[in-house]
Amino acid sequence: MRRIGAALLLLGAAPAPGVRSDLLMATDAPKLADYGMFDAAGRPAPGVQSYTLNTPLFSDGAEKYRFAWLPPGTNAEYRPSGALAFPVGTVLVKRFGFPADLRQPMQNVRPIETRLLIRRPAGWVALSYVEQDGGAVLKRAGMKVPVEFIDKAGRAQAIDYAVPNQNQCKTCHQDGEAITPIGPTAGNLNGSLNGRGSNQLMTWSTSGRLTGLPAGAWPRLAKWDDAAEPLDARARAYLAVNCGHCHSRGGFASNSGLYLVPEETIPAHLGVMKRPVAAGRGSGGHEFSILPGQPDKSIMLHRMIASEPGIMMPQFGRALAHEEGNALIRTWIAAMPAPTAPTLATTATP
């Protein structure tokens, strides 16, 4: 089984020959290597730039390496909310790999898949390339990949890692009728690359890759696992990244009335004392999405802990419950002051 070390994906490595921008715009190539974005060892081509997020999406413990390629002479435009506005020709790359032991994330990393979001003239296109002998190949229908690893608690795990099909990509990346990026927002890029060096927004701006960056304060998404940051900010960041792409006014769960984007301020839309219209199996017999002070009586946590299809949230992208993330949300709900009077906020099922 071919393995890569995370160090091979850093910008300091020798570059691959060059990006085939003509091919990116013209066709869904059968092999990832056809595009020239990485060489056989995973080293990026010139202009394929690494970036990191303050709070990333949980994907069963996979390590993820993110890159962006913008056509020469183009730039992204600053947006205070939602993803940055990227030009036609942009490619956003996310490479997934599992270390043999999650406690040693930089060692013995097995590559699993590479996802591309390509901005073509008609809009964004989502493609998944799965690692096989001889390189990564396009899998439109998705697939299951058996993966074994040691988790952060030292336990042996064996899962069927789910590579999404194209419809599932569209579900998570839905914004109204269009597909849109999720991760590279100003708030989630407002930090240093891999926790070191200069601020990424400033670096992108000074290098000419980002225009319109205001001189004043920029939005910032907290680091969900940094105990030095406020509990509310950490929990909101976690929910925004792991749930907000669907639970937004333009997302797949827009009819739920549960909106978990960073800009939301109405407590009922965040789930606080919000009753579902239809109390199905997903409710676990509980009355409210969030019952302040009572995490074990809150539908939100019940669904995050669940692993049964039709109950678990998120619906896609995980086989395991995220114990650390669930512990954060449990602590957040437990810290909320108990309601002083009953509230009958009622919307669609979350």
Image (spheres, helix red, strand yellow):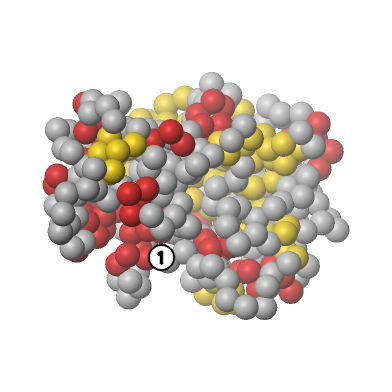
Identity of the amino acid at label 1?
Answer: Lys
Please say if 313 is above or below 324. Answer: above
x, y percent for residue 279: 23, 28
The answer to whether one can see residue 149 in this image is yes
Is label 1 in a helix, a strand or a loop? Answer: loop
2 vs 86, nearest the viewer: 86
Q: Which residue is label 1 attached to?
A: 223
Residue depicted at 39% across the width and 40% down the height: 257
Give the quadrant of residue 59. Answer: top left
Left or right of 47? Residue 55 is left
Left or right for 170, reference 102: right
Q: Picture coordinates of residue 98 (x, y %)?
A: 41, 46
Residue sitting at the far top: 141
Q: Which of 225 and 248 is in front in this view?
A: 248
Name the residue at 71% across, 51% down. 86
Q: Where is residue 161 in the image (x, y as percent from the top left)?
A: 39, 34
Q: Which residue is found at the position 41% from the left and 49% from the top?
A: 260
Locate residue 17, reporting x and y percent. Answer: 78, 50
Left or right, 272 with respect to 260, comes to left
Residue 213 image-quadrant placement:
bottom right
Q: Work out whether residue 131 can be spotted.
A: no
Residue 134, compared with residue 213, is above or below; it is above
How many numbered marks does the figure carry?
A: 1
Q: Residue at x 64, y 47 (%)?
A: 92
In the displayed structure image, the side of residue 197 where residue 205 appears, left or right: right
Q: Quadrant of the C terminus?
A: top left
Classify mark 1: residues with Cα within 10 Å, few (<14), some (14-19) or many (20+): many
**Quadrant in the picture for residue 334:** bottom left
